[in-house]
Structure formats: structure tokens, C-alpha cells
Amino acid sequence: MSEHETAEAIEQRAAEWVARLDRSGADPRAQAELAAWLADDERRRGAFFRAQAAWHMLDRASVLRGGQLADELDPATATQDPEAADLQPGGAWMSRRHMLWGGAAAAASIAAVVTGVSLWTGRAEHIETAIGEIRRVPLKDGSLIAVNTATRLAVELRPEVRQVALVDGEAWFHVARDSARPFVVEAGQVRVQAIGTAFSVRRSTSGADVQVTEGMVEVWSVGDETNRRRVPAGSRMFVGDSAGPQRIIEASADIDRSLSWRSGQLIFDGDTLGQAAAEFNRYNAVQVRIEDPALSGERFVGRFRTNEPEAFARAAATILDAHADIGRDEIRLSRN
């Protein structure tokens, strides 16, 4: 392992490898040399992944800058090796290799959407919901976001990527298909990429809970990009900021219940009273407090509107032989 090799040197070398493979294709000798280089230092794998992502995005970006680059080339240079012509005289374009090799800075910035650094350009749409507010926000690309209570997020639709930064709270995404523009949700150090899908992400202090209702998503944590996991429809997974993806849980019925907030409802089926109260407290200024720990652990079944904490408290008191003290700012549940 090359412990004294700097991160900058690794990024530079990774960019060189990607450019070389683009020229040589599946050359066995190049592939063998690459495998040996990657095996010598774990840091190199992440750098190579980032460089690959940058390469492909630069490929798309090159077409988007003022039309097809081939149309902009001088006829005398159009047949030349594009890697040999790093900068066309008087032109405003560089080859992918030139962009990648410029200290690897260009590669790192383009790959940031995959590795975790937000590339906000100032055109992001910021969305914020108040306590108890649920919004449905259509996006210009045809996607739809259902934004849950007390949630903050920002959306930026760029030519090469569609990016959402979920700062707090929870949102459900129904993603319009666009194979040329990945749809990626950032939640702390967690990344979720749509693969023709509908899914929700709920941010917590240590990671994010991901639930898939249609299609499939790919999840990973920043700094551990090689450990990417796919989560299919009807499944959920917690992805830790540092621990990375956890085990996949098949939970179609549970997912339907947990996402009932999209229609302004909360559905409980065997949840503890404490869990049900915590959910209501997310949506209401009037907070439900449970005085007795044993009462908090009792199981509860019911369906309510998100803005009905009083109805919830009265139902719980009736079912569990408890007392509901309903005040102006607080509801207390205790044993009779």
C-alpha cells in the first residue's frame, strides 16, 4: 500500500487511467495493469470511481455546450485524435482528458454529485414545509415530490443531473424517466439514486430511512462508494452516514402505512402508543405526552387525520383504559 501517496496524486492518476482506458478499450494489458494499481491502495478504488463518473458526465456536457463539438471543429482538425488536440485554436473547448488532468480538479467537481459534494449553482429551488403542512410539488422534468411536515429540501435540475438535497424531514419522489440525467437525493452523507422509480427518504441524525414503492433505487454513503446496494420495490433500508447500507427489509404493507401521510392520514397497526404519539407530534403544535412508560409500550391500532391529536388521544384512552387530559398546548395520557 502506498501510504505516502497524496490524495491529489491518486485523483490525478485515476483520471489518467480513465483517459487511457477510453483510448485502449478492453486491452488485456491495460486491464491487468489497472487491476494491480487498484489492488495496491484502497483509496484508489474510490478515486477511479469518481474519475469514471466525471468522464461520463463530461461526455454529456461536451454535447450540451453550444451544440455538437464536431460541428465546431475546423474541418482540418476534425479528423485528428481528439485527445491530441487539447485546445482548439481560438475555440472555447477542451478535450475530456485536458479537463480531467487539470490537477484532477475538474474531475472532482463533476463527480461531486456521485461522491457527495453539492454543486449548487444558485438556481436551486428551495422548498420548506411548516409543522403539519404537506405539499405536492411538481418539477419541470415531470417528476413529483410529496413533501412531508417540517421538511427542508432544495432541488436543482441541471443538464447532466437532477439533484435534491434533503436537509430535514421526509419526502416521497415519483421520478420521471430520463436516462441521460440521474436523479440523486442527498440526505447528509447518504445518497439515493433513482432507477425508474418512486421512493421516500426520511432524514435522521445518523442517516436516512429509504422506502421504495416502485422500481428500484441504489444507495450508498459518501466515502464508501464501492459499497452500493440496490433496494427493490416493496422494501426498505436504513443507510447510515458512516455505517452505510444496512439489511434490506421486505415490508410492502408497512411501507403503505408509513407513507399514508401523503393523503393526510396516519395509520397504526400494532405500533406502540409511544410510537403513535411521536408521529402525531411531528404534525402538530399540540404535543402528546405519555405519563406512564408502561402505557407508552401498549400496542395500538387506528386510522386518523394527521391534524387530529385530540381524536387520537381520546381513542387511545378508551381502548387502553387510560385518561386523556387535553390542554391548550399539550395532551397528557396517563393510566386511570
Image (tube, helix red, strand yellow):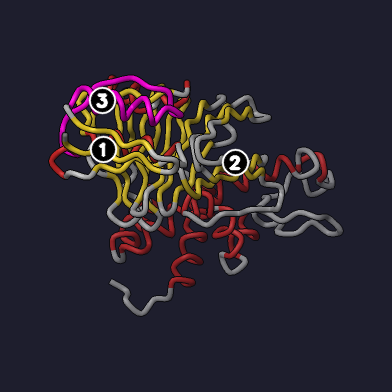
Magenta span of residues: 296-320
Tell me residue 151's x, y (percent).
Answer: 51, 43
Looking at the image, is 303 positioned above or below residue 21? above
* Residue drawn 53% across the image and 36% down it: 183
Q: Nearer the viewer, residue 25 or 225?
A: 225
Residue 333: mark in rendering = 1
The kind of secondary structure element at disc 2 is: loop
Q: Nearer the viewer, residue 96 or 176?
A: 176
**Residue 178 visible, this angle:** no
Mark 3 sits on what residue? Answer: 251
Tell me residue 239's x, y (percent).
Answer: 32, 45
Horizontal side, residue 156 vs residue 271: left or right? right
Q: Which residue type does callout 3 highlight? A: Ala
Decide which of tag 2 and tag 1 comes sooner along the chain: 2
Location of residue 319 (image quadrant): top left
Tell me residue 133's x, y (percent).
Answer: 54, 34
Quadrant where the N terminus sits is bottom left
Mark 2 sits on what residue? Answer: 161
Horizontal side, residue 59 vs residue 255: left or right? right
